[in-house]
Image (cartoon, rainbow, N blue to C red):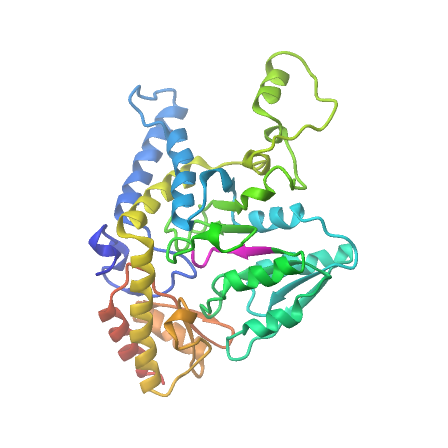
């Protein structure tokens, strides 16, 4: 049974939506939370706030605890960031690069992450791309690419265009053996895949809330950043602000007297939180994470792969090639090599079927709210254009 046994998803009533890798569908209970928040906020800015209005600051704070639970980390390792891009930039800014270092990533990397990495070429840091073969990158390729000159390794989990799942723990071990850090963009899996991140060896991870966390539309999104406990306080971000200071020092300079003549950063995760924190979006994500946790992240991953497998079986019967491994253990969603894929995607959209054209194929990304019958209906509709 899908996530629809826990909450309603009215958006899905009249369409097949296999496009969570672009944007997730919001549970009805989250929509109601959004409506209430807007109503309460409107009253607040009119000066008419009711005494019994919810403490939305506490709700936002609780979202950090829930995100930590979803990825299997500690709340003290989680920072608020505006989005994954900010989180990944912050992570690289904390790593002590020197001229002559290199960063290893794959050509399955999302353009955002790849742009951040190649941007470090301006500082004399080389970008080394590992090339995929039919959507797969084997562990041996990482072993060959990562050397003692490697300062960081960057991966998306899973690969954004085809759902390929990396062996994160093994890659982290290779990186650490060469003194490198592992940075992960988890936007394509946080909320729909079991992480146990403290056990993986990941040093930094960032995500946005608008995809698998079902936190709302792309235009209204926020993010979270994971920093491995041992790096907190030891590594500092490039960007700083008054939030970087210990709370008592920040407050003293506001209320008592100016005393900031030396840089004295705080030593907890708050040192990373120098950006604006959008309360509305965190309140939305907080409710959606409650829904996901009630259903169970392990159950969500299992449901996604069940739907994936039904789609893949149908595509293979029609002779469609994949840019994704068939093995369930190696993928979270899929990319199908369909001729004239952009036209096919547009034709399916006219039939209220939502997927995305990506890098020569159709990216098909179900979520835990999808059902097996939708997979069967999708293959039947797609078959007309093969």
The image quarter in which residue 366 lies: bottom left
Quadrant where the C terminus sits is bottom left
> For the point 62% across and 60% down, which residue is it?
175
Residue 38 visible in rendering: yes
Residue 319 to residue 52: above or below:
below
Magenta stretch contains residue 188: yes
Q: Is residue 217 left or right of residue 253?
A: left
Residue 116 image position (x, y, % from top left): 64, 56
Which region shows up in magenta? 182-189
Magenta stretch contains residue 328: no
Is 296 in front, or is 317?
296
Is 115 in front, or is 341?
115
> For the point 59% across and 60% down, which residue is it?
154
Residue 119 to residue 334: above or below:
above
> For the point 41% across and 35% down, which residue is it?
60
Residue 284 image position (x, y, % from top left): 37, 42
């Amino acid at each position: 049974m899908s996530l629809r046994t826990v909450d309603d998803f009215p958006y899905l009533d009249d369409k097949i939506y296999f496009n969570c890798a672009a944007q997730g569908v919001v549970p009805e209970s989250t929509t109601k939370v959004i409506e209430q928040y807007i109503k309460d906020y409107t009253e607040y800015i009119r000066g008419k706030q009711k005494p019994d209005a919810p403490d939305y600051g506490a709700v936002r704070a609780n979202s950090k605890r829930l995100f930590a639970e979803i990825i299997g980390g500690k709340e003290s390792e989680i920072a608020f960031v505006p989005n994954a891009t900010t989180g990944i930039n912050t992570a690289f800014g904390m790593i002590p690069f020197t001229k002559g270092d290199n960063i290893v990533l794959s050509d399955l990397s999302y353009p955002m992450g790849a742009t951040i990495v190649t941007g470090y070429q301006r500082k004399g840091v080389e970008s080394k791309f590992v090339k995929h073969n039919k959507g797969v990158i084997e562990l041996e390729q990482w072993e060959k690419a990562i050397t003692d000159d490697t300062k960081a390794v960057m991966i998306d989990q899973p690969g954004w265009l085809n759902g390929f799942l990396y062996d994160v723990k093994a890659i982290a071990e290779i990186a650490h053996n060469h003194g490198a850090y592992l940075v992960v963009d988890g936007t394509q899996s946080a909320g729909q895949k079991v992480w146990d991140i403290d056990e993986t060896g990941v040093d930094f991870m960032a995500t946005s809330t608008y995809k698998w966390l079902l936190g709302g539309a792309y235009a209204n999104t926020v993010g979270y950043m994971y920093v491995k406990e041992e790096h907190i306080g030891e590594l500092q971000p490039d960007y700083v602000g008054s939030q970087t200071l210990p709370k008592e020092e920040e407050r003293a300079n506001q209320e008592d007297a100016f005393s900031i003549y030396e840089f004295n950063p705080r030593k907890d995760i708050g040192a990373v939180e120098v950006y604006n924190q959008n309360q509305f979006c965190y309140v939305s994500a907080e409710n959606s994470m409650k829904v996901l946790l009630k259903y169970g992240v392990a159950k969500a991953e299992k449901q996604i792969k069940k739907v994936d497998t039904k789609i893949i079986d149908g595509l293979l019967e029609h002779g469609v090639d994949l840019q994704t491994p068939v093995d369930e253990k190696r993928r979270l969603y899929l990319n199908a090599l369909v001729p004239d894929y952009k036209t096919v995607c547009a034709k399916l959209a006219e039939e209220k079927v939502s997927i995305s054209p990506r890098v020569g194929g159709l990216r098909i990304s179900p979520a835990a709210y999808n059902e097996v019958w939708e997979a069967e209906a999708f293959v039947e509709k797609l078959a007309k254009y093969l």
